[in-house]
Amino acid sequence: MKIIAVGWNYHDHNKEMNRSFIPKEPTIFMKPDSALLKDGKPFFIPDFSERIEYEAELVIKINRLGKNIAPRFAHRYYNEVTVGIDFTARDLQQKLKENGAPWEISKAFDSSAVIGEFIPIPDESRNNMEFHLDINNDTVQRGNSADMIFKIDEIIAYVSHFFTLKIGDLIFTGTPSGVGPVNINDHLQGYIGDKKLLDFQVK
């Protein structure tokens, strides 16, 4: 099982991170299976960072084997979605970037890819899925798949040119604006529409 993630996929998030460019193709990075956190288990803040930030995203699950998938056929390769959190050690990431070094350890550490309960995607909603993240009952992020720079089918087609997609692979599709730090005892809840799919505590 692979965890594939897309960076810089919402204009509003790029703006808040002071990125003025528009990517011409999806920016892809990977997380190992040891990054997966599910079933409402708590997230423990690691001791190597002083600023762990949440990034709420739609996450889709691949349901069939695929390689070099044409965009027009990509919708056949997934039919479930949930809300996930791409945790980022922002201070570590910034330090690595300043040194021109790969920043994978700031994104791919243990339990950094949180997922909620998967639900079926109605065909008519694939490019119009509203989602939001609440922390301690306050909404901190809102997004819609309609606002993605690269839509889900485009992402699948692009990724499949480099990596064979297998059943159970997960794709984190990017985060909208509103990212910020988490603290001990925070309670995170993620929704698609009014359906709560993600619910866990920070320890």
Image (cartoon, grey):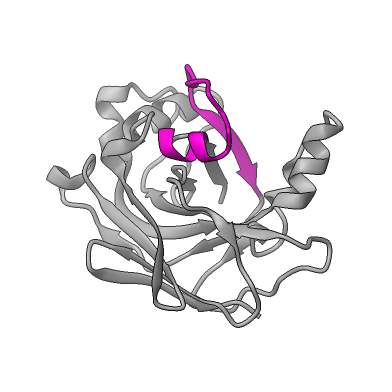
Q: Is residue 190 above or below residue 90?
A: below
Q: Work out whether residue 24 or residue 95 is closer to the camera in this orientation and state it.
A: 95
Q: Work out whether residue 78 or residue 95 is closer to the camera in this orientation and state it.
A: 95
Residue 126 position within the rendered picture, expressed as x and y whole percent measured from the top left: 23, 43
Residue 130 position within the rendered picture, expressed as x and y whole percent measured from the top left: 26, 53
Residue 169 position within the rendered picture, expressed as x and y whole percent measured from the top left: 49, 48
Q: Does the magenta stretch include residue 28?
A: yes
Q: Work out whether residue 84 or residue 146 is closer to the camera in this orientation and state it.
A: 146
Q: Work out whether residue 142 or residue 159 is closer to the camera in this orientation and state it.
A: 142
Q: In this view, does 190 lie above or below 106?
A: below
Q: Can residue 10 be seen in this view?
A: no
Q: In this view, does 48 lie above or below 148?
A: below
Q: Is residue 29 visible?
A: yes
Residue drawn at x 45%, y 46% is 177
Residue 193 position within the rendered picture, expressed as x and y whole percent measured from the top left: 23, 61
Looking at the image, which residue sits at the far left? 124
Q: Does the magenta stretch include residue 72?
A: no
Q: In which quarter of the image is residue 53?
A: bottom right
- Please state, as top left, top right, bottom left or bottom right, where the C terminus lies in the image: bottom right
Looking at the image, which residue sits at the far right? 99
Residue drawn at x 38%, y 49% is 60
Q: Give the range drawn in magenta.
A: 10-31
Q: In this view, does 55 lie above or below 15?
A: below
Residue drawn at x 60%, y 77% is 202
